[in-house]
Image (cartoon, helix red, strand yellow):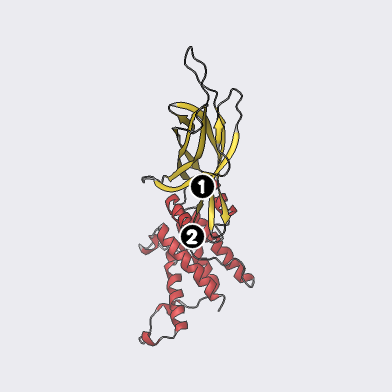
Amino acid sequence: MDLMLEHNKVAELGVRAVGLREAVGAFDLLLMTDIAPTKPSSFPGQEATPRWIRIDGFELYVHPRGQNRVRLAALHASAPSWFAQTDGNVKRSLDFQAQLAPRQLLALEDLRDGGALTLQMQAFGVGGLADDLVGHSMLQGDGYQTVAQSDWITALKGARAFGVMLLETSLPLSLGGKDDETIARQLHLAEQAFHNGDYQNCVGTCRLAYERLKLGPQSKLKTPPDAKSMPFPERIELLFASARHATQLAHHDDGSELSEHVYSRDEARLLLQVTAATVAFWLRR
């Protein structure tokens, strides 16, 4: 990305990586950059005029597939961000960051929809000539950065965003016996499939978790005639049986019209949330 001041290129910015860092009740979004000031430019017959810039940050936008851009956050420099042109310029590393609440990260994941993450960066700051200590000119710079799906998944794992599932439902991380550990592993595989945009596999893996729970016969789907007098434990079992039944289409393909259902992101999220809550409740009874 070229950083400009009144149509003059003052520096070049390259993005090394886009990262995510865990914070208390939030996540820090990091833009790690390398910035190299250019040599002063001059017109024929004139001496070169050095300029300086102060990069205050970037307005960051997400570009979902097939949709208009959506503003994500304002990134601010994590260290002094003053750069001046000289004849012997060297490249310097500088990080920019913004804090994202879990709900913002969840919304970002919805926009990503299991694919790569495409970001647009618009620089803001000031600058001027070498003898202008105030900075009367506005910094300009606009560029795009695409984060590969695999790199973003790695960032989510590194920030332990996977562990809290970004779905506002906690996954059981450690349970009791060997069977319980298998169930927890199935849930984490389902969550990984969700983040990868493989919603069919996500729901199918939820089904396997239900089978490990051994919830009982499908007959519990039927509501008894005296439903109003059902005790709470029976209502819970009916709820769990219904949730398990909703995952069945992804696991069995018998050629019927019902078995051809393709789960959407919202449907997979709902079933993964319910499955995680079901497992956590059932195993702690």
The residue drawn where x is 50% and y is 78% is 216
The answer to whether residue 101 is above or below residue 77 is below
Q: 198 or 277: nearer the eye?
A: 277
Taking the spot 46% from the left edge, 38% from the top edge, the residue there is 123
Which amino acid lies under the numbered mark 1 shown in the image of this protein? Gln
Q: Nearer the viewer, residue 10 or 241?
A: 10
Picture coordinates of residue 191 (x, y %)?
Answer: 52, 59
Q: Is residue 43 above or below residue 3?
A: above
Instruction: For label 2, count other residues whose C-alpha is less than 10 Å away and answer few (under 14), some (14-19) or many (20+).
Output: many
Of callouts 2 and 1, the N-terminal one: 1
Alpha-carbon span between mark 2 and mark 1: 17 Å
Q: Residue furthest top?
A: 45
CB-based contact (under 8 Å), mark 2 and mark 1: no
Q: Residue at x 51, y 63 (%)?
A: 205
Residue plotted at (51% across, 67% down): 276
Residue 163 image offset from top left, x and y in percent? 56, 60
Element at label 1: helix
- Whether 178 is drawn above or below 63: the answer is below
Marker disc for residue 149: 1
Instruction: Determine which of the numbered discs, if any, sits on residue 202 in the image.
Output: 2
Residue 151 in the image: x percent, y percent? 55, 46
Looking at numbered disc 2 in the image, what kind of residue is underneath it?
Cys
Q: Residues within 10 Å of mark 1 (few under 14, many from 20)?
A: some
